[in-house]
Image: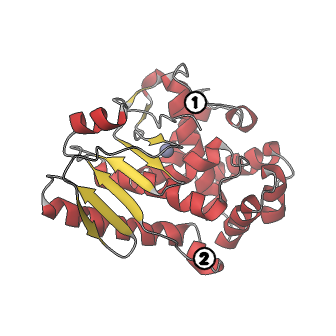
Amino acid sequence: MPVKNCGIKSFLGAGLVIAITLCGVLAARVVVAASSPWQEEKSEHFIIAYQHVPESFVKDVIEAAEDHYRQTMTTLGFTRYTGWTWKNRVKIVIHDSQSAYVKASHYAWSAGQVSPDTKEIVTFPSESGFFDSLLPHELGHIIFREGVGFHDNIPLWLEEGVAMYQERARRLGADADVRDLIAQGYFIPLEDLDRITLRSGTSRATVQIFYTEAASLVGFLINKYEVYRFVRLCRELKEGQRFDVALNKAYMEFPNLSALERSWRRYLDETRE
Ligand SMILES: [Zn+2]
């Protein structure tokens, strides 16, 4: 799985501003230097590994992580509609500083990385966005993958959209941003969005549009319909079903991506304030 850059803050054409978190999804576990004196603090669902960051910060991380865990499980319907059990705690490795993080991870462009298969988040205390963006976003990746498994049938827009949707501010702003994209001619049709692979050469504007549309579309799938449909979609995907088949089985009104896009855009028109 390639590293995915979850984007950065910047201006898009015509004055449209879309702010997006930085994150990386890794297939491989990030190795922590064995010689470092790491301490651990445990809670019901988390293990926090740290060296010299203040204990008060560690306690704040635990409190926020448990809170985001409960919210994400509820939002995705996992606690309500599945006999879902959480296996093993999530490990959050907090380096002392950005330089220590970069030295260990070799990813200078991101503020954190997540490995859903090993349930590990690696990060460092950053001056902004740590509790509101990075933590819910990366945790969203882990919880979602716990729900849908690790087949290669998950569209990238769905995976990143679910993670973006856990960031409350992004969730609230995504629909308005997509309406602006449509009005200004920047909207990427869903069939094209579905084919996008984010690589180092992908333009910043495309990355930003991708994440914004993904967050709005996931919000549509969750908010417009009873949440059991999203749970059914996840269950079908976990069983290895192709995405288009799983979508149609769960929602029963989207035979293809074009039909999904039409309903999504109609919803954006109807919910315009
Ligand atoms: Zn992400």
As drawn, the label of residue 198 is 1
Taking the image as shown, residue 130 lies to the left or right of residue 252, namely left
Q: Quadrant of residue 221?
A: bottom right
- The correct choice, above or below, for 63 with respect to 14 in the image is below
Label 2: element kind:
loop
Disc 2 target residue? 84
Q: How is the image coloured?
A: secondary structure
As drawn, the label of residue 29 is none
Taking the image as shown, residue 264 lies to the left or right of residue 74, namely right
Q: Is residue 193 visible?
A: yes
Looking at the rendered structure, the kind of residue marked 1 is: Leu
**If you read the primary sequence from the N terminus, does the residue marked by circle 2 or circle 1 appear first?**
2
Residue 185, image x and y in percent?
62, 26
Between 133 and 42, the one lying in front of the other is: 42
Label 1: element kind:
loop
Crowd tier of the residue under label 1, counting other residues whose Cα lies within 10 Å: few below 14, some 14–19, many 20 or above: some
- The correct choice, above or below, for 106 with respect to 29 in the image is above
Name the residue at 31% across, 65% down: 64
